Image (tube, rainbow, N blue to C red):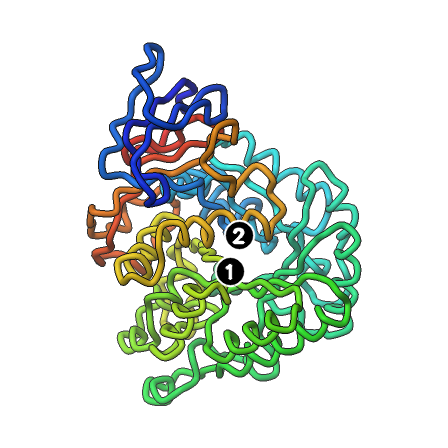
Amino acid sequence: MSDRTYLIKGADLLGTGRTDLLLEDGRIAAVGKLGDAAQAAMIEADGLVALPGLVDLHTHLREPGREDAETISSGSAAAAAGGFTAVLAMANTQPVTDTAEAAERILDLGRAAALVDVQPIGAVTKSLAGEELAELGLMARSRANVRVFSDDGRCVHDARIMRRALEYVKAFGGVISQHAQEPQLAGGSACCHEGELSGRLGLPGWPGVAEEVIVARDVMLARHTGSRVHVAHVSTAGSVEVVRWAKSQGIAVTAEVTPHHLLLTTDLLSGYDPVFKVNPPLRPQEDVDALRAALADGTIDAVATDHAPHARHDKEHAFAEAAFGMLGLEQCLQVVTTTMVQTGRMTWADVAAALSTRPARIAGLAGHGRPLAVDEPANLVLIDPSATGTIDADASQSLSRNNPWHGRTLQGRVHSTFLRGRATLLDGEVQK
Ligand code: DOR
């Protein structure tokens, strides 16, 4: 990783106009029309848009336990390649991140990899078993300063436990990120969206309402407790309606959508390719349209990747047996550029809000999601929005290859990423 002074010449600042930026000692030292700085490395940013470094509320890094699929180091490299300067590492590792020590270990491994700030998410319940609260207070008071808690991969389905968790985290400004899925409606061998196609393919499906009933329950629990709930990977138009209503009532709910739910639809399952198997499942176009509209109008606060690497021996099976999940870190910004910016639904300032400012605020990360202004931490990404590229799964930084974007042409190229003034990606090359 290069640790030096950078002069970025002529970047388009959040799409509002061209300017130069001087990065020095980890901060943005100057913004405006700047003369050459002798000791600075110059980056010609003609045609590049500068955004605050991206923050991912939902990343599976797999370490400890499944280092064959991803490590904190390889996942950090994928994050830097995607323009991220902070990622929240999900708790469903082996062992589960349900203690202060486990959370601190992830923090330390992230610092050692030093490509992105890795902020651990703590489990809501011990071993993700859904039966007993994990050490929420100890994790919050630990060096890892945990503020986001989630049993992701599983729903906190017991309403009494969800209520207690919300009450508990309120004391220290924490938030529960819920994988909304009613197990009685979505359990068993279900592996895709329930609809006409699942019937035709002979795959057991689960309906959108399995998500929606939990979102509805949880916003009422958030209202009752006065605490914050965050809905992970919202995937249906019905969930959007509930979140929109809850926000109109002043309930403290936030929500995220994944890149794959913004672009891919359930029709892709007709080839039974397990790369498209994900939880929650890909949905019909009507849901995709509702998710795009909700992201554009701010009902959905953030885009989060749900980057879910899987080793070949877990993923490359008959559809019904394959693991759930797909990669997301490296192509997230391109998918958002393709679906939201190119189509005129969002400006670059909107993208900065949805991929940096709001996720940083939801997670309580003070040094991220800041404006690109003098004296702010130099966390930023440069993207070339006019470039197009065909995605090659083998070019990934991830140790896994379950990339749903393989072979697709997406708009935009992540050019460079800076973490506190250090280049972690320079002209497309990760700086390890
Ligand atoms: O598809 C998914 N994969 N959804 C989840 O919620 C968990 C994730 C994983 O850990 O693989």
In the rendered view, would you say 106 is above or below 329? Answer: above
In the rendered view, would you say 195 is above or below 315? Answer: below
Say if mark 1 contacts mark 2, CB within 8 Å: yes
What x and y, as percent, mark residue 387?
20, 46
Image quarter where the N terminus lies is top left
| Residue position for label 1 | 301
Q: Nearer the viewer, residue 421 or 185?
A: 421
Could one spot residue 132 in this view of the protein?
yes
Q: Secondary structure at mark 2?
A: helix
Q: Nearer the viewer, residue 425 or 357?
A: 357
Question: Going 63% across and 61% down the picture, which residue do you hit?
Answer: 151
In the rendered view, would you say 234 is above or below 361? Answer: below
Q: How many marks?
A: 2
Q: Nearer the viewer, residue 206 or 288?
A: 288
Label 1: how many residues lie within 10 Å, few (<14), some (14-19) or many (20+)? many
Question: Going 69% across and 75% down the picture, which residue do you hit?
Answer: 220
What x and y, as percent, mark residue 260?
38, 63
Distance Cα–Cα, label 1 vs label 2: 6 Å
What x and y, as percent, mark residue 429?
30, 33
Residue 211 in which image quadrant: bottom right
Residue 144 in which image quadrant: top right
Q: Amino acid at mark 2?
A: Arg
Q: Amino acid at mark 1?
A: Asp
Image quarter where the C terminus lies is top left
Label 2: how many residues lie within 10 Å, few (<14), some (14-19) or many (20+)? many
| Residue position for label 2 | 358
What x and y, as percent, mark residue 9?
29, 27
Question: Going 36% across and 48% down the picture, which residue do you hit?
Answer: 330
Q: Secondary structure at mark 1?
A: loop
